[in-house]
């Protein structure tokens, strides 16, 4: 039996580890902190999460917060 609360369910799936995913050129360009991005999608699709993660990453990399437009 597997799932939440079991030993098996608590292990990380190596297939879901982003370090194991080979990014394609468009993905690398989209993740480049020096590029401007425009996020558009339906309600509930995770836009706010994506932007918040990007802001956190930029701040930890030392980007001046005054450079943001969100």
Image: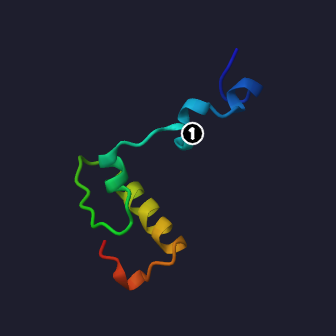
| Place of residue 52 in the rendered image (x, y in percent of width and height, measured from the top left) | 43, 63
Q: Residues within 10 Å of mark 1 (few under 14, many from 20)?
A: few
Placement of 25 over or under 5, stated as above or below: below
Placement of 60 over or under 25, stated as above or below: below
Q: Residue furthest right?
A: 7
Placement of 62 over or under 19, stated as above or below: below
Q: Residue at x 26, y 57 (%)?
A: 39
Placement of 65 over or under 16, stated as above or below: below
| Place of residue 57 in the rendered image (x, y in percent of width and height, measured from the top left) | 49, 65
| Picture quarter with the N terminus | top right
| Picture quarter with the C terminus | bottom left
Q: Is residue 57 left or right of residue 41?
A: right
Q: Answer yes or no: is residue 63 visible.
A: yes
Name the element at disc 1: loop
Q: Residue at x 37, y 52 (%)?
A: 28
| Place of residue 20 in the rendered image (x, y in percent of width and height, measured from the top left) | 54, 38
| Place of residue 3 in the rendered image (x, y in percent of width and height, measured from the top left) | 65, 24
């Amino acid at each position: 039996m597997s799932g939440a609360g079991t030993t098996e369910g608590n292990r990380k799936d190596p297939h879901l580890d982003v370090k194991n995913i080979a990014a394609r050129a468009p993905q690398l360009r989209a993740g480049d902190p020096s590029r401007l991005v425009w996020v558009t999608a339906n309600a509930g699709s995770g836009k706010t999460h994506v932007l918040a993660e990007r802001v956190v990453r930029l701040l930890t990399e030392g980007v001046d917060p005054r450079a943001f437009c969100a």
